Image (cartoon, grey):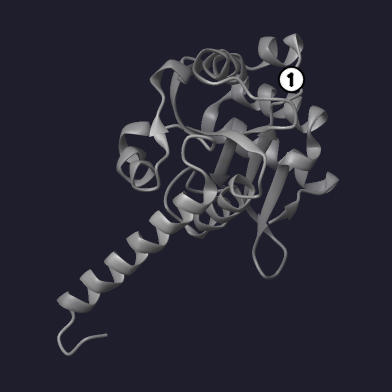
Amino acid sequence: GETANAGERAAIIEMVQRHEGNESASIARYWLARQPEAFRAVRRIDGRLIGFLANLSLEATTPEDARADPAIARAIDYVARHGPAQPGELILYGRFWMDADRHQAITPVFTVAAAICSQSWIAGNVAWSFVAMADPDLAEPMFTEIQMRRLREADFEVGGRCYGVFGHDWRVEPADAWLRLKAERSLRIDGEIAARTPGGI
């Protein structure tokens, strides 16, 4: 997942427009201009763009950012109420991510986007991380498993569609505890698979 190049930006806007509508596409265009480095391309081996992720940094947001994107306005309010970031701490927001053809279905694009986000969350100095989902009810069990809690106060609406938000305060549960939990979970899943597989794996 490298930073999207200038030639891929039009394709990213088109992807958002097709899956989420004109208003969402305008917001994506705003963030592409404001934080182009946040947009990571997911490409096939042949170089073709098959999806993308926009993992925004919110610690230096402006009133204009909040006006441009209701998701950001709600997240900033949430942080202010539930645990303001201290100087030097980061707030990361997985604002957009999608597969070119299947939007937010569980495809290889989802796997890459999840890996990029996870690496950024545990990089140190992160106060909060947020992820917006078009179908939060479907995603909730998966996010709950990794301690990304449903934050209904941070939900938002764009173009008549409601989006659900998940988040984590990394000062309450730091990265080392989170990684330990993930490791225990993957060992448990491996054990369950082995138990169901005749003769072991």
Quick check: 18 above or below 176?
above
In terms of image quadrants, where is residue 9? top right
Question: x, y percentage for residue 80?
Answer: 57, 14
Image: 199 above or below 148: below
Q: Residue at x 69, y 51 (%)?
A: 41
Q: Provide the residue designation for mark 1.
A: 61
Q: Position of residue 92 (x, y in %)?
A: 63, 35
45 vs 152, nearest the viewer? 152
- Residue 104: tell me if it is visible: yes
Nearest the eye: 111 or 144: 144
Is residue 135 at least partly visible in the picture?
Answer: no
Q: Secondary structure at mark 1?
A: loop
Residue 163 lies, with reference to residue 175, above or below; the image says: above
Q: Quadrant of the C terminus?
A: bottom left
In the rendered image, residue 128, in percent from the top left (x then y), is placed at: 57, 32
Which residue reaches farthest right?
6
Residue at the image position 21 percent from the left and 70 percent from the top: 192
**Horizontal side of residue 81 vs 27, given as left or right:** left
Q: Residues within 10 Å of mark 1 (few under 14, many from 20)?
A: few
Q: Quadrant of residue 53?
A: top right
Q: Position of residue 38 (x, y in %)?
A: 73, 40
Callout 1, which amino acid?
Answer: Thr
Quarter of the image with the N terminus is bottom right
Seen from the viewer's position, the closer of residues 35 and 151 is: 151
Residue 16 horizontal side relative to residue 197, left or right = right
Which residue occupies 52% across, 17% down? 78
Q: What residue is rendered at 67% in x and 70% in y?
A: 45
Q: Residue furthest bottom?
A: 199
Q: How many marks?
A: 1
